[in-house]
Structures are given as structure tokens and as C-alpha cells.
Image (cartoon, grey):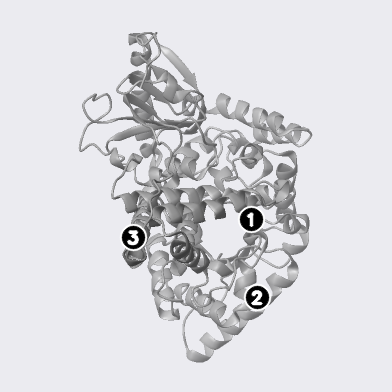
Amino acid sequence: MACPRDIKAERRLTGIPVSPGVAMGPMRLVCGGDTSPDIYPITEDELEGEWGRFEAALALTREQIENLKKRVTEMTGAKEAEIFDAHLLFLLDKSVMESIRSELRVRRQNVEAVAYAVIQTYIEAMRRVDDPYLRARTSDFEDVLHRLLENLHHSSASVEAFAPASGGAGDSGSAGIVGARDLTPSDTAALDTESVLGFATELGSTNSHTAILARSMGIPAVVGVPRLLLDTCERQYAVLDGYKGVLILNPEPETKEYYERLRAEKNQFYKALEAMHGLPTETKDGRRMRLAANVEFAHEYANVVSSGAEGVGLYRTEFFLLGDRGFPDEDEQADHYAALARACAPHEVVFRTFDAGGDKLPVEQPDAPEDNPFLGWRGIRVSLSRPELFKIQLRAILRASSVGKCSIMYPMISGITEVRLARELLEECKAELRREGRDFDEHIRTGIMIEVPGAAAIADVLADEVDFFSIGTNDLTQYTIAVDRVNFRVAHMFRSSHPGVIRLINKTIADASAKNIPTAICGEMAGDIAMLPLLVGMGASELSVGVHHVPIIRYAVRNLNYWECRDMVREALQAKDSSTIKALSKGLAMRSYPDLFD
């Protein structure tokens, strides 16, 4: 690949920072070309052999994606791993597979050429639909197609091939910074975190699946870098600044010295956070908050305790629905919930009931996918429509409450009827357990997720029905401003600082406070240090964040003044645009804890 003439001069390429950190080392370029396969005729006698070759590649592709999903699950949790559910569903789509087999007989061409033609037809059709959710899924299917073709060719030109055996930062012999036109979720999940120091891409957005995985895996990343591949050379030494979104090629000695110092300072600072492990999460003027962790898997239990989190503010129970083993029975669930309750004692664990859509319910698969799953049969709607399954989970949580402090939270609440129906089922479960002589907490707390604008609008009414609120800022933002954050055409419009979102959050917290119930924040906004002053100033009583964010958020809260945040919020609520609100909050954050910013 040709290099720019000024190869020895320091050059700075600017993109979008999506995952913080500093990486220093040689560039390793991944140049994906045209994925269209060669086309050649086959005879009728070769048809079955070609189909057998396709089935073998299909099985290998499925195994690879399952392994990627397992790897991401182990590293970051089930939420990020759900990215690969769409890949697997597409591979299991009977209509697609039948179309490929039918076209194979008609065209009598090599199977990779037929598969490419059929799948591209599906992809192009999806690109033309009006539904933004379906359009956003085209990248997932392109990812599957590329992997399937690689397996048919028995070769690999993807980023997975870049996995040097060893090497550290700055080691020009092995480890490096990946540069690419784009990285698929599969590419990102397959990165060897020991040898890939960071990555930069020409395409991408802050809220893409690739960016989410990079943050979860702790890989510094910058996306949206124009002319990256044209302006970069293989093995050219570079510095990747995941804080500011800059790729610095051929850094001058003083630039390298600055970033080596910055990296050392950041590492030292994060180690110093451990010394605050036992300190309360409270502002400088004594405003106390509960700081809890978001959890999905058993292997995270120890991290909750070691991080100093005050229990679990959001336990996602959907992992029981992963795989094909069917719906878990009451004893299986009760044992698992009880183990977490014991591990977190004396702190509370908030169990969110299954937040699953119909396409994830293992006991029944729909004949056709829903037109818009985000607005469809999911969350509490699924649970209430299958009371026999819902009661199994409620009984299991109640039984776990006998060994530790537990509470129950219902997702996707849109109105008071759903809350009351859920309470009726819970009371039935309590009565059954009493008759059976089983122990449980008679006064177990129940709460609801506020993630639907309609629920936020009637928060004063809902507050009379429950013991606490938890605001899911991701979905609340998505539903309020009608933006799918993983749709690259509108992802730049996804802003939790949108005036409409901020006013709904403020109203929800105020309505809850008026009825003397607490409000937690459990979406990504809770872990955003730039937005933290807004949440503190609006009066949030609890924050629930990823385990790795706990020490940072504790430090930030302890450096804020509640009344200063409160004054800032009054000004923010009068702002007319999201940039003004973000600037007000970030400005106060940078004055309060500048060492968390570069």
C-alpha cells in the first residue's frame, strides 16, 4: 500500500472517540476487499456435493458465532453478547436456506456464488424498507455473509488473522494498533486483547455494536477517521488517543513522552481509586447516594464485592433464556438467585424480571418476526401473557429473599394496569408459598423500570403503586426522541442530554420524591462522568453501573457539591438544545474532578 510522502513527519488524523485509553505501537492494516466470489458452473452430479459443502460451512459459521458470543459473554456480559443473536437467527432462517438450495438447482453454479446472490438480495431488500430497525440489521447479515464465504473458501482475510502471540505496548515486533475501513461485531469480538493495543476505523459511530464491544472489552478505539487507510502505512508507529479521538502517526519524541506520561498517570490514578473502596458514595456537602452494580452472570459476583458496590441495582435475568435448554424451572432459578443474594449480603439485589421479547422466549418461536420488536411483545408484556411462567420466576425470587435482601423490578411498564396485574400474580405466589410453609420476605420491595415516555408522564400515579423507580436511560432516550442508537443513519442523533429526555427524568425523580420513594438510574448515563452532575442535581437517590465503573463514579460523586449541581440543573432545564445541557453538566464535571478528563 502506498504511503504519504511525508511519512517521517508527525501527522494527526481526527475521528470519533468511542473507547477511552491510550495505545502506542505499530499500525497493522486490515484491508478487506470485494467479498463477491468467483462464479463457475457445476454439473447435476455435483449438486449434492456443493450443498454438502455449504452445510459444512454453515455449521462452522454457526459454531464460530456461538464461540464469539460465549467469548463476549465471559468478557463483558450477556447484553453485549446479544449482538450476535441476530447473526444466529439469520443462519437458522429456513426461508433463506431453502432459497439458496432452490437457486443452486436452478442456476447450477458453485454454492458460494449462489449464496452470495441470494443473501445480497435479502440485504438489498432490507436496505429499502422504511423501518429503521430492519435497515440497521443489514450490517449483521453482511457480517454473516462474509464469514460464510470465508468458510466456503477455507481462508480468512479478516481481522481475526491478526493475533500475534505476544508483545506489549510499543513492541514493534508483535502487538499493534489495528487500522481498517470498518470492523464488524465479529471482528471486534475476535480481537486478541493481548496483541491488539487499540483500533481505528474509517467508518463507525459512538453507538455502533463495534463501539459498544470495544468499551466492554477495554480496547481504546477511534472511529470515523477519514482516509485512514490511504494516509497510514503498515508498521508505521502511531499513538491512538481514545480520549480525544486522535490517531497520531510518526509521533515526535515530545508527543510520545506526553502520552507515555498520560498513560502512566491514568494507570496510577485508577490504582489510587482502590484506596476509596470503603468510603461512602456521598457529595462533598453530605448528599448520600447508593452506588450499586449492574450484573448478569455468576462470575461477576466476586467483582461486585471487590469493587465496593452496595449490592446489585440491576440483575438482568434474561441469561436464563440464552441457548436452547428451555425455560428454567423454579428450583434452578431460586438456587441461582439465592447464591447472588448471599454473595451481596447485607446489601440488596434488585432482580429485574425477564426483559425478553417473543423472539427470545425458548418455549415458543413465532412463525414470523415482529415488524418492530422494540414496540412489540417484550418485557412485562411477555410475562403477563404467560402467567404460569411468570409465577415460576416470582416464586423463585421470593424464595431467594429468605437468605438475602431482594427486591423485584418489572421492565417495560407503560401503565398502571400492568403494575396491578403483576402485583396480583405476586400476591398469588406469596399465598402459595405460605401454604407450602416456605420462607420468604413478606415485605419484599417491588419497583418498575421507567423507560417508556408514557410511564414517565404518569410517574406521579405509578409512584403510589410501587416502592421504587429505576430509570433505564437508554430505552427512555430511544423512545422519547425516536432514534435507534445502532442505526448508523441516525445514531448521531441519539443524545441522552436531549431537553425532552432530561425533563422526563427530572419529572420522574421529582414525582417519586414527592411520594417518598427512591429513584435509581441504571442506563449508560449513570456511568457517564460528564452527565453525572445532572443526575446528582436532579436528585437521583441511586446509581447502578457496570462493575468496572463503580470506583470511578464513587470518586466523581465524592468530588461534587449537591447544591452546585442543583443550581446547574435549574439552568439546564431551561436550555433549548442538548449541546447546551451537555456543556453545562460537563463543565461542572471538569471543574469538580478534572483528573478524570484529559
Give percent across and percent down for residue 328. Answer: 44, 76
Look at mark 3 in the image and give the residue it sits on: 63
Do labels 1 and 3 touch, CB within 8 Å? no
Look at mark 2 in the image and give the residue it sits on: 423
Q: Secondary structure at mark 2?
A: helix
| Closer to us: 381 or 231 | 231
Q: Earlier in the sequence, mark 2 or mark 3?
A: 3
State which quadrant residue 486 falls in. Answer: top right
Look at mark 1 in the image and give the residue it sits on: 518
Answer above or below: position of 12 versus 382. Answer: above
Q: CA distance from mark 1 to mark 3?
A: 45 Å
The residue at 32%/65% (across/down) is 52
| Closer to us: 286 or 72 | 72
Which one is in front in this view, the residue at disc 2 or the one at disc 3?
Answer: 3
Classify 10 Å Cα crowding around label 2: few (below 14), some (14-19), many (20 and above): some
Classify 10 Å Cα crowding around label 1: few (below 14), some (14-19), many (20 and above): many
Farthest residue, direction bottom: 435
| Closer to us: 129 or 585 | 129
Answer above or below: position of 469 versus 392. Answer: above
Classify 10 Å Cα crowding around label 3: few (below 14), some (14-19), many (20 and above): few
Answer above or below: position of 519 versus 244. Answer: below
- Amino acid marked by disc 1: Pro
- Amino acid marked by disc 2: Arg
Give percent across and percent down for residue 158. Answer: 35, 41
